[in-house]
Image (cartoon, rainbow, N blue to C red):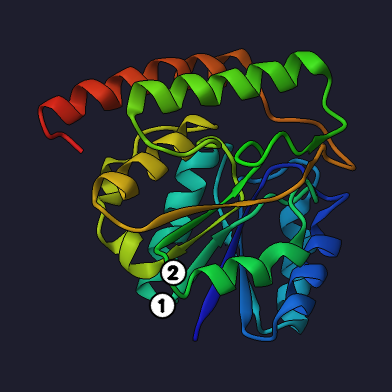
Amino acid sequence: MKILTIIPTYNERENIEEIIHTILNVDKRIEILVVDDNSPDATGKIVDKIVKREKRVKIIHREKKMGLGSAYVRGFKYALKHGYDYIFEIDADFSHNPADIPRFLQEMKDNDLVLGSRYAYGISVINWPISRLLLSYFANFYARKITGVPVHDLTGGFKCFRREALDGIDLEKISSGGYAFQIEINYKVYKKAFRVKEIPITFIERREGSSKMTKKIIWEAFFLVWRLRIGSLFKKI
Protein backbone atom coordinates (compact mmCIF):
# COMPACT_ATOMS: atom_id res chain seq x y z
CA MET A 1 0.00 0.00 0.00
CA LYS A 2 1.48 3.33 -1.13
CA ILE A 3 0.07 6.46 0.52
CA LEU A 4 0.85 10.04 -0.47
CA THR A 5 -0.11 13.16 1.43
CA ILE A 6 -0.03 16.33 -0.66
CA ILE A 7 0.64 19.62 1.12
CA PRO A 8 0.40 22.80 -0.96
CA THR A 9 2.38 25.68 0.55
CA TYR A 10 2.76 29.41 0.26
CA ASN A 11 4.44 31.13 3.20
CA GLU A 12 4.15 28.31 5.74
CA ARG A 13 7.61 28.42 7.33
CA GLU A 14 6.11 28.55 10.83
CA ASN A 15 4.26 25.26 10.33
CA ILE A 16 5.87 23.17 7.62
CA GLU A 17 8.57 21.29 9.50
CA GLU A 18 6.31 20.32 12.38
CA ILE A 19 3.40 19.25 10.16
CA ILE A 20 5.71 17.06 8.06
CA HIS A 21 7.18 15.26 11.07
CA THR A 22 3.75 14.87 12.67
CA ILE A 23 2.29 13.24 9.55
CA LEU A 24 5.29 10.93 9.07
CA ASN A 25 4.87 9.67 12.63
CA VAL A 26 1.22 8.73 12.06
CA ASP A 27 1.92 5.82 9.71
CA LYS A 28 5.22 4.48 8.36
CA ARG A 29 3.64 3.90 4.92
CA ILE A 30 2.87 7.58 4.40
CA GLU A 31 4.98 9.71 2.09
CA ILE A 32 4.63 13.47 1.68
CA LEU A 33 4.73 15.69 -1.38
CA VAL A 34 5.03 19.42 -0.76
CA VAL A 35 4.00 21.64 -3.69
CA ASP A 36 5.50 25.03 -2.96
CA ASP A 37 4.62 28.17 -4.93
CA ASN A 38 7.99 29.88 -4.52
CA SER A 39 7.14 31.06 -1.01
CA PRO A 40 8.84 34.39 -0.23
CA ASP A 41 9.37 33.23 3.34
CA ALA A 42 11.61 30.35 2.14
CA THR A 43 9.20 27.53 3.00
CA GLY A 44 10.60 25.62 0.03
CA LYS A 45 14.17 25.87 1.29
CA ILE A 46 13.14 24.46 4.66
CA VAL A 47 11.53 21.48 2.92
CA ASP A 48 14.64 21.01 0.75
CA LYS A 49 16.65 20.42 3.92
CA ILE A 50 14.09 17.88 5.15
CA VAL A 51 14.14 16.06 1.80
CA LYS A 52 17.90 15.52 2.10
CA ARG A 53 17.52 13.58 5.34
CA GLU A 54 14.06 12.02 4.96
CA LYS A 55 13.38 9.70 2.00
CA ARG A 56 9.61 9.83 2.51
CA VAL A 57 9.43 13.56 1.74
CA LYS A 58 9.43 15.07 -1.76
CA ILE A 59 8.97 18.58 -3.04
CA ILE A 60 7.85 20.25 -6.25
CA HIS A 61 9.00 23.86 -6.65
CA ARG A 62 6.79 26.09 -8.76
CA GLU A 63 8.00 29.40 -10.14
CA LYS A 64 5.24 31.59 -8.71
CA LYS A 65 2.00 31.61 -6.77
CA MET A 66 -0.41 29.65 -8.96
CA GLY A 67 -3.16 28.71 -6.55
CA LEU A 68 -4.48 25.81 -4.51
CA GLY A 69 -6.30 24.01 -7.30
CA SER A 70 -3.38 23.78 -9.70
CA ALA A 71 -1.09 22.76 -6.83
CA TYR A 72 -3.28 19.78 -6.02
CA VAL A 73 -3.68 18.83 -9.67
CA ARG A 74 0.11 18.84 -10.00
CA GLY A 75 0.30 16.63 -6.93
CA PHE A 76 -2.40 14.27 -8.22
CA LYS A 77 -0.54 13.78 -11.49
CA TYR A 78 2.63 12.99 -9.54
CA ALA A 79 0.73 10.46 -7.41
CA LEU A 80 -0.78 8.68 -10.41
CA LYS A 81 2.54 8.59 -12.24
CA HIS A 82 4.33 7.07 -9.26
CA GLY A 83 1.73 4.45 -8.41
CA TYR A 84 0.27 5.64 -5.11
CA ASP A 85 -2.88 3.86 -3.97
CA TYR A 86 -4.32 6.50 -1.62
CA ILE A 87 -3.80 10.23 -2.00
CA PHE A 88 -4.52 12.71 0.81
CA GLU A 89 -5.12 16.42 0.77
CA ILE A 90 -4.20 18.26 3.97
CA ASP A 91 -3.40 21.84 4.94
CA ALA A 92 0.02 22.81 6.24
CA ASP A 93 -1.28 24.93 9.11
CA PHE A 94 -2.62 22.27 11.54
CA SER A 95 -6.23 23.27 10.90
CA HIS A 96 -6.54 19.57 10.02
CA ASN A 97 -5.42 17.10 12.66
CA PRO A 98 -3.00 14.47 11.28
CA ALA A 99 -4.16 12.14 14.05
CA ASP A 100 -7.37 11.69 12.05
CA ILE A 101 -5.52 10.03 9.15
CA PRO A 102 -6.00 6.45 10.44
CA ARG A 103 -9.77 7.02 10.50
CA PHE A 104 -9.66 8.03 6.84
CA LEU A 105 -7.62 4.94 5.96
CA GLN A 106 -10.13 2.70 7.72
CA GLU A 107 -13.01 4.18 5.72
CA MET A 108 -11.07 3.94 2.46
CA LYS A 109 -11.47 0.16 2.55
CA ASP A 110 -15.06 0.62 1.35
CA ASN A 111 -14.96 4.03 -0.37
CA ASP A 112 -13.24 5.90 -3.18
CA LEU A 113 -13.26 9.36 -1.61
CA VAL A 114 -13.46 10.09 2.10
CA LEU A 115 -14.12 13.69 3.10
CA GLY A 116 -13.36 15.24 6.47
CA SER A 117 -16.53 17.13 7.31
CA ARG A 118 -17.00 20.15 9.53
CA TYR A 119 -20.79 20.16 9.11
CA ALA A 120 -22.16 16.65 8.59
CA TYR A 121 -22.60 16.02 12.32
CA GLY A 122 -23.33 19.47 13.70
CA ILE A 123 -20.71 22.20 13.42
CA SER A 124 -17.13 21.36 14.38
CA VAL A 125 -15.10 24.52 13.88
CA ILE A 126 -12.89 26.17 16.51
CA ASN A 127 -11.67 29.78 16.67
CA TRP A 128 -13.53 31.20 13.69
CA PRO A 129 -15.42 34.47 14.02
CA ILE A 130 -19.17 33.96 13.67
CA SER A 131 -19.22 35.87 10.36
CA ARG A 132 -16.77 33.48 8.71
CA LEU A 133 -18.49 30.44 10.19
CA LEU A 134 -21.86 31.51 8.83
CA LEU A 135 -20.36 32.31 5.43
CA SER A 136 -18.76 28.87 5.21
CA TYR A 137 -21.80 26.99 6.50
CA PHE A 138 -24.29 28.63 4.14
CA ALA A 139 -21.85 28.51 1.20
CA ASN A 140 -21.74 24.74 1.62
CA PHE A 141 -25.54 24.59 1.93
CA TYR A 142 -25.82 26.62 -1.29
CA ALA A 143 -23.27 24.45 -3.11
CA ARG A 144 -25.02 21.26 -2.02
CA LYS A 145 -28.42 22.45 -3.22
CA ILE A 146 -27.24 23.73 -6.59
CA THR A 147 -24.93 20.84 -7.49
CA GLY A 148 -27.09 18.09 -6.02
CA VAL A 149 -24.08 16.45 -4.37
CA PRO A 150 -25.27 15.00 -1.02
CA VAL A 151 -22.24 16.25 0.92
CA HIS A 152 -22.44 18.74 3.78
CA ASP A 153 -18.89 20.04 3.49
CA LEU A 154 -18.02 20.45 -0.19
CA THR A 155 -15.34 23.09 0.45
CA GLY A 156 -13.31 21.18 3.03
CA GLY A 157 -9.66 20.47 2.30
CA PHE A 158 -8.98 17.33 4.33
CA LYS A 159 -9.74 14.24 2.25
CA CYS A 160 -8.42 11.01 0.80
CA PHE A 161 -8.84 9.66 -2.73
CA ARG A 162 -8.44 6.16 -4.05
CA ARG A 163 -6.20 6.39 -7.12
CA GLU A 164 -8.98 5.02 -9.33
CA ALA A 165 -11.15 8.02 -8.45
CA LEU A 166 -8.52 10.49 -9.62
CA ASP A 167 -7.70 8.35 -12.64
CA GLY A 168 -11.38 8.30 -13.54
CA ILE A 169 -11.73 12.05 -14.04
CA ASP A 170 -10.00 14.36 -16.48
CA LEU A 171 -7.57 16.35 -14.37
CA GLU A 172 -6.77 18.56 -17.36
CA LYS A 173 -10.32 19.94 -17.17
CA ILE A 174 -10.06 21.01 -13.53
CA SER A 175 -10.06 24.78 -13.88
CA SER A 176 -10.81 26.14 -10.42
CA GLY A 177 -8.44 27.59 -7.87
CA GLY A 178 -9.01 28.33 -4.21
CA TYR A 179 -11.89 26.67 -2.40
CA ALA A 180 -13.89 26.33 -5.61
CA PHE A 181 -11.41 23.62 -6.54
CA GLN A 182 -12.63 21.50 -3.62
CA ILE A 183 -16.21 21.76 -4.84
CA GLU A 184 -15.24 20.91 -8.41
CA ILE A 185 -13.14 17.86 -7.60
CA ASN A 186 -15.77 16.44 -5.22
CA TYR A 187 -18.50 17.05 -7.79
CA LYS A 188 -16.65 15.27 -10.58
CA VAL A 189 -15.78 12.27 -8.46
CA TYR A 190 -19.40 11.95 -7.31
CA LYS A 191 -20.78 12.32 -10.85
CA LYS A 192 -18.56 9.46 -12.00
CA ALA A 193 -20.41 7.25 -9.50
CA PHE A 194 -17.48 6.68 -7.19
CA ARG A 195 -18.26 5.95 -3.54
CA VAL A 196 -18.07 9.10 -1.41
CA LYS A 197 -18.33 9.27 2.38
CA GLU A 198 -18.06 12.06 4.94
CA ILE A 199 -16.54 11.52 8.35
CA PRO A 200 -16.56 14.09 11.16
CA ILE A 201 -13.46 16.15 11.89
CA THR A 202 -12.81 19.17 14.08
CA PHE A 203 -11.40 22.10 12.14
CA ILE A 204 -9.15 24.44 14.12
CA GLU A 205 -8.20 27.86 12.76
CA ARG A 206 -4.52 28.03 11.78
CA ARG A 207 -1.99 28.36 14.59
CA GLU A 208 0.56 30.43 12.67
CA GLY A 209 0.57 32.51 9.48
CA SER A 210 -2.37 34.15 7.74
CA SER A 211 -5.46 32.85 5.95
CA LYS A 212 -5.41 32.68 2.13
CA MET A 213 -9.15 33.50 1.86
CA THR A 214 -10.03 36.41 -0.47
CA LYS A 215 -13.19 37.85 -1.99
CA LYS A 216 -12.06 36.58 -5.38
CA ILE A 217 -11.97 33.03 -4.03
CA ILE A 218 -15.48 33.41 -2.60
CA TRP A 219 -16.95 34.70 -5.86
CA GLU A 220 -15.21 32.00 -7.88
CA ALA A 221 -16.93 29.34 -5.77
CA PHE A 222 -20.28 31.16 -6.02
CA PHE A 223 -20.31 31.03 -9.82
CA LEU A 224 -18.65 27.63 -10.14
CA VAL A 225 -21.62 25.71 -8.79
CA TRP A 226 -23.85 27.06 -11.56
CA ARG A 227 -21.24 26.24 -14.18
CA LEU A 228 -21.11 22.67 -12.88
CA ARG A 229 -24.90 22.40 -12.77
CA ILE A 230 -25.35 23.74 -16.30
CA GLY A 231 -22.44 21.68 -17.59
CA SER A 232 -24.04 18.51 -16.20
CA LEU A 233 -27.16 19.16 -18.28
CA PHE A 234 -24.96 18.96 -21.37
CA LYS A 235 -22.86 16.15 -19.86
CA LYS A 236 -19.74 18.33 -19.75
CA ILE A 237 -18.35 16.81 -16.59
Asked whether the beta carbons under mark 2 and mark 1 sit within 8 Å of each other, the answer is yes
Q: Of helix, strand and loop, which one carries label 2?
A: helix
- Say few, some or many: other residues with alpha carbon within 10 Å of mark 2 (under 14 / 14 to 19 / 20 or more): many
Where is residue 229 drawn, in percent x and y? 26, 24
Q: Residue at x 62, y 76 (%)?
A: 31
Instruction: Classify residue 98 by image quadrant.
Output: bottom right
Instruction: Classify residue 125 by image quadrant.
Output: top right
Q: Which residue type does callout 1 highlight?
A: His
- As drawn, the label of residue 82 is 1
- In the rendered view, does 174 fall on the left or right side of 212? left
Q: Of helix, strand and loop, which one carries label 1?
A: loop
Which residue occupies the foreground of this view, 214 or 194? Answer: 194
- As drawn, the label of residue 79 is 2
Give the spatial CA distance, label 2 vs label 1.
5 Å
Which residue occupies the foreground of this view, 136 or 227? Answer: 136
Q: Residue at x 67, y 84 (%)?
A: 55
Which residue occupies the foreground of this view, 2 or 69? Answer: 2
Quarter holding the C terminus is: top left
Q: Residue at x 55, y 62 (%)?
A: 88
Where is residue 149 drawn, in percent x and y? 37, 36
Q: Is 109 rendered above or below residue 175?
A: below
Q: Which residue type does callout 2 highlight?
A: Ala
Residue lying furthest front: 121
